[in-house]
Amino acid sequence: MNVLENGMNVSAKVVELSKDFMLVDYCGKVYRIDFERYPYFRSCFLSELYNVQASAGGLHWPDANIDIEVEYIENPPAETNDVDLDWWKAQRKRILARLGAIGGLAKSPRKAAASRHNGKKGGRPRKVEDLALA
């Protein structure tokens, strides 16, 4: 994606993607982003990884909710203060659940047809309570 910021043309795109790293072209310079250092990229869909946006300060993956400053990629600190992967996955799960709930509320002719078809078969099976003998 290209952005004109402060008169400077800023662009970013994923050049190569493998299971251990990705190469991102940011303003004509290619950066290697290792998934060992940024483990949350391993949990992303391909479409989320390829949707990268550029700003004057760094890279942004809006679908995955990930931001990385270019300064941090060029000069990584000796010790990493990684975002807790479990926290990030939990946050991502909540976001995807919310999107799924919104999608489930959608009404379309196809969903209506599927509902009518299931209704002809007797509808959704009833839950049967297990009765324990005393």
Image (cartoon, rainbow, N blue to C red):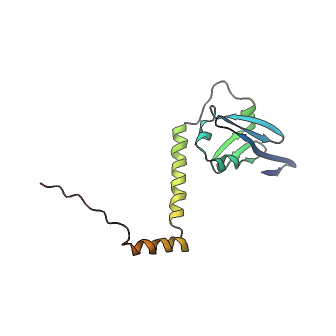
> In the rendered picture of this protein, how many numbered marks are placed on residues?
0
Q: Is residue 80 left or right of residue 32?
A: left
The foreground one among 6 and 15 is 15
Q: Quadrant of residue 121?
A: bottom left
Task: Measuring from the top left, give residue 56's x and y in whole percent.
Answer: 79, 44
- Image quadrant where residue 103 sits: bottom right
Q: Residue at x 53, y 46 (%)?
A: 91
On the image, the x and y values in percent for residue 35 come to 64, 35
Nearer-the-camera pick, 15 or 52:
15
Residue at the (82%, 46%) spot, across then down: 10
Q: Residue furthest top?
A: 78
Is residue 107 at least partly visible in the picture? no
Residue depicted at 55% across the width and 37% down the height: 85
29 vs 133, nearest the viewer: 133
* In the image, farthest residue toward the left: 134
Q: Residue furthest front?
A: 121
Residue 117 position (above or below residue 103): below
Q: Is residue 74 visible?
A: yes
Q: Is residue 1 left or right of residue 21?
A: right
The percent coordinates of residue 96 (x first, y second) are 54, 53
**Is residue 37 placed above or below 2 in the rendered structure?**
above
The answer to whether residue 21 is left or right of residue 25 is left
Q: Is residue 78 above or below residue 21?
A: above
State the residue at coordinates (71%, 47%): 52
Above or below: residue 117 compared with residue 76: below
Relative to 134, is 44 on the left or the right?
Answer: right
Q: Quadrant of the C terminus?
A: bottom left
Residue 14 percent coordinates (x, y): 74, 44
Point out the residue furthest to the right here.
Answer: 7
